[in-house]
Image (tube, rainbow, N blue to C red):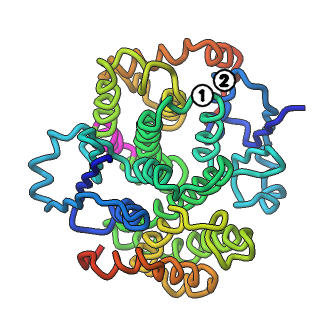
Amino acid sequence: MSDYKLVYFDGQGRGEIIRLIFAAAEVAYEDERIPMDKWPQLKASTPMGGLPLLETQGQQLFQSLAISRFLARKFGLAGKSELDQVRVDIVVDTIEDIIVPIRRFWHLETDEQRKVALRNVYLEETLPNYLNNLEAILKSNGNGDGFFVGDGVTWADLFFLCLVSRFELQVKITDPLEKYPKLKALYDRVKRVTGVAKYLSTRKESAF
Amino acid sequence: MSSYKLTYFNLRGRGELIRLIFAAADVAYEDVRITKEEWAAMKANTPFGQLPILEINGKTFCQSNAVSRYLARKFKLAGKTDLEELQVDMIIDCFEDIVKPMFFLKMETDETRKTELQKKFLEEQLPAFLANLDKILKSNKGGDGFFVGDALTWADLAFLSIAGWIKMSGGEAVAEKHPKLKALKARVEALPKIAAWIAKRPVTDL
């Protein structure tokens, strides 16, 4: 019986950052995956009508980033000083800014032509601007050959893995980090962190 | 004694939460407001190409929520336990969820789409969001205090900004249906240090 139960759909999406934190920390948890056809009945019983949820200490917690920060701090993956913690939050928020527009053409837009147009704007303007910023943040830590913050992996690095997954699964770009060698090297480095490597070696493919 | 310098436009926007935190904590800071032209000239020389930025003892940080959390924790406005801090973060993230449709609505240039998005916002998204927020507030001792615990946190201050943006997006009538949320807003605005800041801050459209 674990101290933690994650409830999410059977995919990466907004649940994956939490799974990666448990993996990197090598902490056991119950990974409950809700099939899409069971969701409508379950929805009304959730606090905010959404997933993921983390059940712990008798509470039902929601909001993936709030949950992630709470767990990361508990497991020493949130940055070692207060200033490092704000730096981690800055990276996470910057990555979130890159993810938000994807939802517009992936989920929200139903008209095919508009979907394509939005995706093009994202690829040609939005994304390069943000990836430049993200690489600048990485380079401001030493010379960008380590992790995003401090001298060890933090949940900001794990959230970066989630970003790359979104590029592959939702935006469908083949080599998204092609023009960003330091970010590309970071991606490989994070995948090799012990607990993360173990988790990724058994992670099943999913549509999102 | 740390030195703080905030740089943002002459707007409330994404800078105001930081200003409200300094006001509530009664901590001095330099409140630099620049024009769009000055920003265009400066932008390439800033580490992250975005505003607001906060310089703390000469080191530059961006991302308004990240900076706000750091300051709130320093000034004891972030919740008293790690679970309370999480509850505050949960609420902040809920606010971001309603900011996104407001932002997309503002950015939409196609008039037909804009009308559709506005309808969806006012008839579905905003009512659902406010109903959830009301639930969260009421789950804290009936909803006659603050969002979390028994003291002001930056979640209550962030609510002031959100309330302003909802009003600008045409959502005031919907918001009127939630008296406890309305009362919370009034309660926070009436706190002496907040009221004093509101009275003296520059008056801007956004």
Residue A41 seen: yes
Give the percent coordinates (x, y) of residue B131. Answer: 66, 74
In the picture, the disc for residue A25 is 2
Extreme residue in the front direction: B1
In 3D space, how far apart are the residues under numbered discs 2 and 1 (Cα atoms)?
8 Å
Give the percent coordinates (x, y) of residue B147. Answer: 62, 67
With respect to residue B176, does A40 lie above or below?
Answer: above
At horizontal 68% and vertical 35% (from top left) the residue drawn is A11
With respect to residue B55, does B172 lie above or below?
Answer: below
Quadrant in the picture for the C terminus of chain A: top right
A1 to the left or right of B19 = right
Q: Nearer the viewer, residue A50 or A206?
A: A50
Q: Nearer the viewer, residue B197 or B205?
A: B197
- Pointers 2 and 1 in contact (C-beta within 8 Å): yes
In magenta stretch: residue B189: no
Residue pointed to by mark 1: A76
With respect to residue B103, does B114 lie above or below?
Answer: below
Give the percent coordinates (x, y) of residue B81. Answer: 66, 50
In magenta stretch: residue A122: yes
Give the extent of the magenta segment. Answer: A119-128
Q: Residues within 10 Å of mark 2 (few under 14, many from 20)?
A: some
Q: Nearer the viewer, residue A154 or A198?
A: A154
Q: Determine the chain carrying the residue at label 2.
A: A
At horizontal 50% and vertical 50% (from top left) the residue drawn is B73
Please state which amino acid type lies under the numbered disc 1: Gly
Q: Determine the chain carrying the residue at label 1.
A: A
Residue B103 seen: no
Magenta stretch prevailing secondary structure: helix
Give the percent coordinates (x, y) of residue B165. Answer: 42, 73
At horizontal 64% and vertical 44% (from top left) the residue drawn is A67
